[in-house]
Image (cartoon, rainbow, N blue to C red):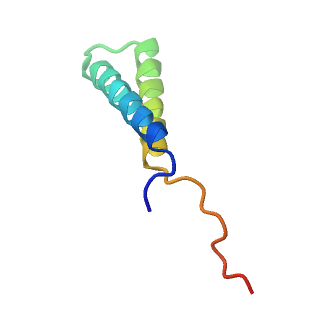
Amino acid sequence: MPHANQKAKQSAQEKYKEAKAKYQELKSKPNKTKEGKADEAKAKKEMEHQQKKANEKGENHSQKAKT
């Protein structure tokens, strides 16, 4: 089943790419501070969130057989 909203999927994919780039940049920094680690965790969470939004198919209504 395709994604219910193609524009939302595209937007989420673009945001995912941006978040992934930011995460990779923060992850590759040596000598991380507490703030750096917090920023890295935040970037990873955002990246995972956008990936989930891009892969979400949308709502699936009425899965049960109506009797």
Q: Quadrant of residue 39?
A: top left
* Viewer-closest of 54 and 34: 54
**Quadrant location, the N terminus:** bottom left
Q: Is residue 36 above or below residue 55?
A: above
* Viewer-closest of 11 and 36: 11
Q: Is residue 58 above or below residue 8?
A: below
**Quadrant location, the C terminus:** bottom right
x and y, in percent, of residue 58 in the image: 55, 52
x and y, in percent, of residue 10 in the image: 40, 37
* Viewer-closest of 22 and 64: 64
Residue at 32% from the left image edge and 19% from the top image edge: 26
Q: Quadrant of residue 28?
A: top left
Q: Is residue 39 above or below residue 4?
A: above
Residue at 43% from the left image edge and 57% from the top image edge: 2
Numbered circles on residues, count: 0
x and y, in percent, of residue 50 in the image: 45, 36
x and y, in percent, of residue 63 in the image: 63, 72
Residue at 41% from the left image edge and 28% from the top image edge: 15
